[in-house]
Amino acid sequence: MNDELFHIVNKRTFLIALLEATFIVILPIWGYILKDIPGVNEFLIGVIPRDLQHIYGIFIFPLVHNDLSHLFGNVIALYVLLLLLKNSFSPYYYRIIACGWVFPGIFIWLIGNSNTMHIGASGLVYHLAFFIFWIGVVIRHPNFIAQSLIVIFLYGGFFWGILPLFPEVSWEGHLGGFISGTLQALILYKPISMLYPKQEEEEDEDDAPPDWYEEENDNIIDFRDTKKNN
């Protein structure tokens, strides 16, 4: 197993993972703090579908939240998923986050109701959750499977979030995160799987007899061969 992928293995690398995750999740917290400051709050907007004047909301909407429950619900989930992401997918860490940050907003802008504004980091949360889930399903490495089970255990209800069941919930953002997380998992699963050894090869090596076995059994006669010679 390639230990370089597992950055959370000692105090130093674990601290780095915590700091990187903290830096990212603190961004929506700052967004919540600044949203009530005059002159700043007018730029902190969500995604308004097909509104070209405010199209920059695609890049800002993960920072904007309605209230503290909305904020901390996303921040806590995001923090857990970022640690899982850093643990196993460090070479692709920021690439995965960037895709999950932007694609759900583009998806909302294209298909959302034009009379609505969509805010919150849940699109990014859905992207990370389904990326980790599908990598475990496709690659079936024990570590990835374990992380998929963690995602199911903690966020199994996410599957309902991609359906238009609640009018006050941005199911378009959730669906966008689901699609982008799934697609990126399918795109990256081959390079990621190449960074890990195949479990079958390790098992075959373990099943091979030790070197001393052949040396101690050189004097064994195969009577089937002697009968053939006669």
Image: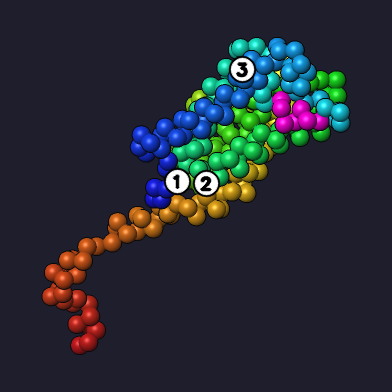
Q: Is residue 30 magenta?
A: no
- Secondary structure of the residue carrying numbered label 1: helix
- Secondary structure of the residue carrying numbered label 2: helix
* Viewer-side residue, 117 vs 140: 117
* Viewer-side residue, 176 vs 203: 176
Q: Which residues are magenta?
A: 55-61
Label number found at residue 91: 2
Residue 183 x %, y %: 66, 43
- Secondary structure of the residue carrying numbered label 3: helix
Residue 68 x %, y %: 61, 12
At x 56% / y 45%, what residue is drawn?
92
Badge 2 amino acid: Pro
Badge 1 amino acid: Leu
Label 1, on which residue?
A: 5
Badge 3 amino acid: Leu
Mark 2–mark 3 distance (CA, rounded to whole Å): 28 Å
Do residues under tags 2 and 1 come within 8 Å of each other at their CB atoms? yes
Label 3, on which residue?
A: 71
Do residues under tags 3 and 1 come within 8 Å of each other at their CB atoms? no
In the figure, 63 relative to 193: above or below?
above
